[in-house]
Amino acid sequence: EDQVTQSPEALRLQEGESSSLNCSYTVSGLRGLFWYRQDPGKGPEFLFTLYSAGEEKEKERLKATLTKKESFLHITAPKPEDSATYLCAGTGANSKLTFGKGITLSVRP
Amino acid sequence: NAGVMQNPRHLVRRRGQEARLRCSPMKGHSHVYWYRQLPEEGLKFMVYLQKENIIDESGMPKERFSAEFPKEGPSILRIQQVVRGDSAAYFCASSPRGSEQPQHFGDGTRLSIL
């Protein structure tokens, strides 16, 4: 059975304090690894897709990387508006996403 | 904004009633997915549909739950004879094709069972 595990469950950072969020996955025939951001009361907002080990994607203060077993979301110099829950999900040939439970990030000013 | 539209945003039902949740995919997207999110749990896949076809319903309970995506109109997730355990946020996502294409989500329907 496909499995995605995210750690830590919650992370509190001071504004400007860089850190990384971890996503470990076991997805049969991985076709894509996705990162989403979810704000309270909203649906997940797509951030990145990674397709193969060694791939990296960047957007503003966020950078996502992928290995054969893990993905990392690096947050550089975060701001309070980066506070949200970050979700990792993998898909194989069956097209359905298997999600982790998410990491709740709080950035203090 | 031509994103994924879900309605209603909030739905309250009494035990034993029926709940109908609607999802209009993004323009140009013919693949629709439904997920359920319980408090303190991650999003769980329920069903994957293309126009007029159910592709994968392996995550959907076999009793009381059904889904459709007709040729015309939105996708519908239907829950008959609701029970308290059905209380959750139900999210719809769409993509232009299946497999490795990013899925784009609506803001969900929050279902509460009295």
Image: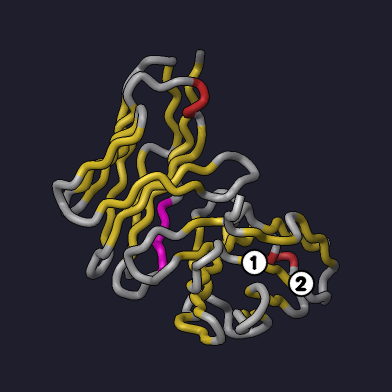
Q: Residue at x 82, y 61 (%)?
A: B12
- What's the amino acid at mark 2? Ala
Q: Is residue A76 left or right of residue A96?
A: left
Q: Is residue A31 left or right of residue B114?
A: left
The image shows residue B70 at horizontal and vertical percentages of: 62, 83
Q: Residue visible at 68% across and 65% down?
A: B85
User: Observer-nearest residue: B9 or B82?
Assistant: B9
Q: Position of residue A68 (x, y in %)?
A: 16, 54
Q: Quadrant of residue A17?
A: top left
Across and down, in percent, residue B67 comes to 62, 79
In the rendered image of this protein, does residue A102 appear above or below residue A105? Answer: below
| A98 within the magenta span | yes
Q: Residues within 10 Å of mark 2 (few under 14, many from 20)?
A: many
Checking the image for residue B19, the label placed there is 2
Q: Secondary structure at mark 1?
A: strand
Image position, residue A2 (x, y; %):
32, 66
Q: Looking at the picture, do discs 2 and 1 lie on one chain?
A: yes
Number of the front mark, 2 or 1: 1
What range of the chain is rendered magenta? A96-100
Near-viewer residue (A85 or B84): A85
Residue in front for this viewpoint, A62 or B45:
A62
> Residue at point 52% right, 53% down?
B41
